[in-house]
Image (cartoon, rainbow, N blue to C red):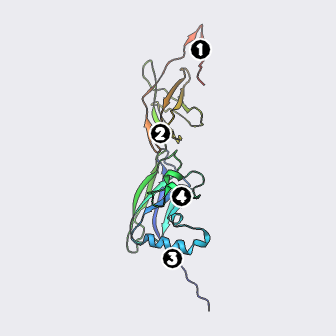
Amino acid sequence: MIEFMIAQHQVAIAGRVLDAVTGKPVPGAHVEITQGAPGYTERLALLAEFGSSGGSTRTELGTTRTRPDGLFFFLDLPDGDYKLVAFLPKGGIYTKPPKEAGENSEDSFGWRGDKRYGKKQFDAKVPNGPGRLDRLAVIRLQPTGVTGRVVASANQSAVLMAEVRCKGSGERTFTDAQGQYTLARIQPNARQKRTLLVRARGYRDRPIEVLIDTPGVCKELPDVSLDTEKRVNGFTQPNLEV
């Protein structure tokens, strides 16, 4: 007689990763346990030993990715407190880490993370008893970018539908009725400023330079004042900015 064993897995930690600006789900986000409850490390080592033939490592076993709806979960964890980190990965997330990363690093955001978003660290608790899932965590990833307001220099009134574009890349956005804009998901660079081009119908183009250097920070900029286009003999002077 052949006996079958049925494993009943229980969800221990679950949550949803959202874009902090749009509120939309972030699919494919990397969620990693950076510190586990007593017994967690031993369980990872045991699972890695049994799964070694398939190439699984302890680091991979402590991670997961969000689904298209932003949901993620971890199964069958020992009771206790956990620390986790979530971030959007760049290409090649499951390649081997650089030697300088080290196995004992707090998390792998430095070499795995897409810096157009920041990372979000959070705590979770796996309770004892039948109600294993304590709560559904909501994780909001902050895009890297800038925010501000575009106004008319003549009277400081808001400029609606002004375009704010990052020169040299495809990121752009438009101001709302209050002149507010948020330009998100920009690749940071600590060594070189980026040029933003602000343009609106009836106004002269205005380039501004800004240093976008910290992942996951939306830097607030001073108001951008646009001058009205000059007219000579009934004709509008052309904008020379590109």
- The residue labelled by disc 2 is 213
The residue wearing badge 4 is 66
Q: CA distance from mark 4 to mark 3?
A: 22 Å
Residue picked out by circle 1: 237
Q: Which residue is mark 3?
A: 8
Residue lying farthest to the bottom in this orientation: 1
Q: Earlier in the sequence, mark 3 or mark 2?
A: 3
Which sits earlier in the primary sequence, circle 2 or circle 4? 4
Q: Kindly indicate whether the residue at mark 1 contacts the one at mark 2 (C-beta within 8 angstroms).
A: no
Identity of the amino acid at label 1?
Gln
Q: Secondary structure at mark 3?
A: loop
Q: What is the distance, in whole Å, between disc 2 and disc 4 at their CAs?
A: 27 Å
> SS for tag 4?
loop
Q: CA distance from mark 1 to mark 3?
A: 73 Å
State which mark lies toward you, 2 or 4: 2
The CA span between labels 3 and 2 is 47 Å
User: For the point 56% across and 11% down, which residue is it?
Assistant: 231
Q: Position of residue 35 (x, y in %)?
A: 42, 63
